[in-house]
Amino acid sequence: MNKFYTLLLVLATVYSAALAQPQSNYAKEHYTKKEVYITMRDGVKLFTAIYTPKDASAKKKYPIIMQRTCYSVAPYGEGNYPARLGPSDLMMQEGYIVVYQDVRGRWKSEGTWTNMTPVIDTKKSKRDVDEGSDTYDTIDWLVKNTLFNNGRAGQWGISYPGFYTAAGILANHPALKASSPQAPISDFWFDDFHHNGALLESYFFTYPVFGVQKTDTTSKAWYNNQLVNTNGARDGYQFLLDMGALPNADKYYKNNFFWQETVNHPNYDEFWQKRDLLRHYNKVKPAVMLVGGWYDAEDLRGPLSIYKTINQKDPSAYNTIVMGPFGHGRWSRETGHTLHSNVYFGDSIATFYQRNIEAKFFNHFLKGKGDKNSGLPKAYMYNTGKKEWAQFTQWPVANAQHLKLYLSADGKLPMTQPASQGSVSFISDPLKPVPYTEDNTTTMGFTPHNYMSEDQRFAGRRTDVLVFQTDVLQDDVTLGGEIMSHLKVATTGTDADWIVKLIDVYPANEPNHPYLPNKNILMANYQQMVRSEIMPGRFRNSFEKPEAFVPNQKTNVDVKLQDVLHTFKKGHRIMIQVQSTAFPLWARNPQKFVENPYKATDADYVKATHTVYNDSYIDVEVLK
């Protein structure tokens, strides 16, 4: 087994529990471990590990804090302890009854596994179960059967465990007082495995973890024999390009149920819609703190969309959001110097979050008064340009001013529409797609990471990437809030993807910082990705009913980018890049309209000339 698959198995097994925490005996010295099976209302038994502080007593009771996971609650065995318990070392030392549970169908739990279990709002019998009911039944058992608990429960989780936390909000158990979904998936069509319906082919190697049913309760990975035989390949771009059209993946995944579900549901049909969490938040009872990273390549949309949805549907709920300068889940561990890709943000930022935000939230609602006066703001957001935290009473900010940045045919990015009509074109060849990253060593990993703030000079120097930029800024410009791209485009083909990237261009005299991980990088003229997104043109009018382009006909395509809080400093430039491929991050569009692009043949992949007109613009929100 090569090093990549060794890493894959490690990540899949302990992903939710540790994220490479330092070794420690604290948990074993201060906690007592108990392993139990908790029976759900339909009779399925879920394996649960309970860690209780050794000094717990009738006079010293602790709240329960729980994580439900599909990645295993290892280490198994009542004599075996992890290096860390709970969300942080600080909270472990302060003392909580910490609970981990294998969700149904995974590891040592019974039942059948499904990805993003659909929510059943109205349950008519004990057979109607979902993650909300499993959360309810688990909390109900815990508060009744776990000694020395104070009757309050909280839930947290990162990534897929973040989804279980977000779905657990819907449990509505009276003991559930605080919930912190961190990097949660909210809808597989818009986040994680897809963006706006565009497939992330960079996730190709993860499907065995999510698409193979186990046959019995187990403490060992059962999907090992389903891993892709790469024959020692290390370059994911070349491996996946050589694989060709997606039907060729049946060589590996003919019996992988999640892959087959994906390729057989190319549109936003009932299969995907019933996995949309957002439509189920109405009255929210527990206090909620969404947490995300501005550079989370897996689940950026989830925390933002859940936060906004709860605000809209239940304005009276205690609902807050935290967004830091982190990649996926990186706020859960301290790295000392906080970097993403080559960008340095400061020191001990994860510790600041854990001490001043996360612990404060849980302590208030699980140990303290539990009222809405937690001392935390509505939104705790990190400005990735100024490199400092900012607090807001509302997000998006109410008094933000909208600004339009036009894609001028001369490559400029003016704030007023060009006086005369113009356009610029490029040839897109799906057989020679634009790479999404310059670092080929990362293209066969579990999921992408560094590209979210990576230097974009490698892309902007290609002829199939359009570049538009402002003059050198004379003053700081802070973008804070939502971004919508309104493209006016045409293509000689009948289908196309449209990718928009917002970039911060550093000055020519920018010095290198002392913690630069890649010594071959120059921060001078660095083109830092701030935000990017893809929109399949076939879904420009409807995600349910795709439409072909009429060749050479000017057409509107809107591309919604996720929120930002970023100050473009004086002396920098704002840049927009537009392209149609970013491989293998996103699967290639054949550029010939077919009913199901996942079943397009190699012959369906064709060159096309794409045109962007100069009345296209990017609508941004500016904070004064």
Image (cartoon, grey):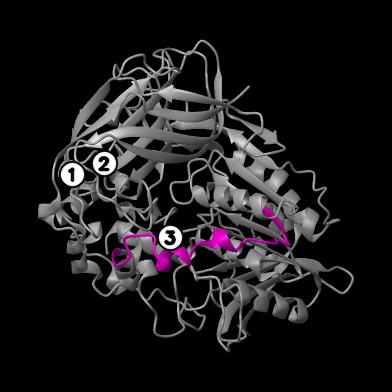
- The alpha-carbon separation of the residues under discs 3 and 2 comes to 28 Å
Quarter occupied by the N terminus? bottom left
Question: Which residue is under mark 1?
Answer: 430
In this view, the residue farthest toward the left is 603
Residue 11's tag is 3
Q: Amino acid at mark 1?
A: Pro
Decide which of tag 3 and tag 2 comes sooner along the chain.
Answer: 3
Position of residue 367 in the picture relative to residue 153 (left or right):
right
The residues colored magenta run 263-289
Expressed as whole percent of the image width and height from the top left, the position of residue 150 reads: 82, 69
Position of residue 279 in the picture relative to residue 257 (left or right):
right
Q: Amino acid at mark 2?
A: Thr
Q: Secondary structure at mark 3?
A: helix
Q: Closer to the camera, 93 or 576?
A: 576
Q: Is the Cβ of the residue at disc 1 closer than 8 Å to that at disc 2?
A: yes
Decide which of tag 1 and tag 2 comes sooner along the chain.
Answer: 1
Q: Give residue 13's quadrant in the image.
A: bottom left
Tell me if mark 1 has few (under 14), some (14-19) or many (20+) residues whose alpha carbon lies within 10 angstroms of its own: many
Can the viewer see residue 29 in this picture?
yes
